[in-house]
Image (tube, rainbow, N blue to C red):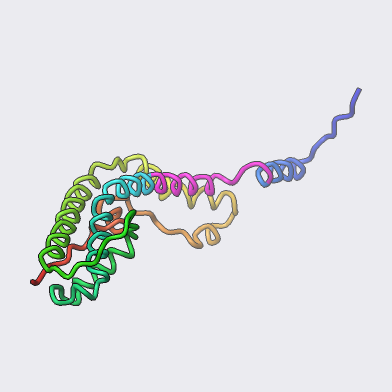
Amino acid sequence: MEEVPILGRGDERQIVNEFFANYDAPAYVRRARRVQEALETVLAKCRRQREEWLGVARTRLGLLRGLAGGWEALRPWLTEQGLDELRLLETELTPRPRVPVEITHSSRVLERAFRDLCASLERFNRRWLAFLPSVDLAPVNELREGYNRYYLLEKECAMRSSRLARQGFQHLDPLTAATIAETFPPLPVPAWNG
């Protein structure tokens, strides 16, 4: 027959601590992870939808830049703010034309390409601003509410110190369509002055 060691109170605690250290995180850490994962899931869904809808605007931006040969060529028709908005759009959308575009000096061709781009940007913004309120934020907000309610208690139990538990804690406000719009804002639509 095998001997079974008799454990004292301290031995049990040590075994439990070793188990959690090797196999699982404390409850407050798991809770924070779930909140972060839920947020990342929502943002990933929004990012995918945004990328899908940006295709036409991205193509038209690349076409306009190719036709102009560069943003400075549009200076006669755009304000400095308009040029800055085009540069910002180029940085954000990173258009990559599939075929080379021949440069033109025709103001009519450039204006038509510019107006097509602006129509695409406006259409994207309308769709995007209509989409954001339709995103189901209830699961994320439920996790955030649980985080706000239980995180400090769970951390205090694990650390055995309310002072240490409060360090670094930040209350999480409910996620809204407006807060997602701060991460993924509507696109600027430059104005043609010609």
Please state the horizontal and vertical placement of residue 64, each as a whole percent of the image.
22, 62
Q: Which residues are magenta?
A: 22-41
Q: Does residue 2 appear to the left or right of 7 in the view shown?
A: right
138 sits to left or right of 67: right
Find residue 16 and report its image quarter.
Answer: top right
Q: Nearer the viewer, residue 135 or 3?
A: 135
Figure check: 154 above or below 97: above
Let me know if residue 136 is in the magenta part: no
* Number of marks: 0
Nearest the camera: 163 or 169? 169
The outermost residue toward the left is 194
Q: Looking at the rendering, in which quadrant would you find the N terminus?
A: top right
The C terminus sits in image quarter: bottom left
Residue shown at 59%/53% (left/top)? 160
- Along the horizontal axis of the image, is 164 left or right of 10? left
Would residue 171 be found to the left or right of residue 192 on screen?
A: right
Q: Position of residue 22 (x, y in %)?
A: 69, 44
Magenta region includes residue 28: yes
Residues 122 and 144: in front is: 122
* Rendering coords of residue 94 (x, y %): 34, 60
Prevailing secondary structure of the magenta residues = helix
Q: Depth check: 60 or 102 in front?
A: 102
Task: Decide: is 24 above or below 188.
Answer: above
Residue shown at 30% from the left, 40% from the top = 136
Extreme residue toward the top, this view: 1
Residue, x 18% and y 76% (percent of image)? 75
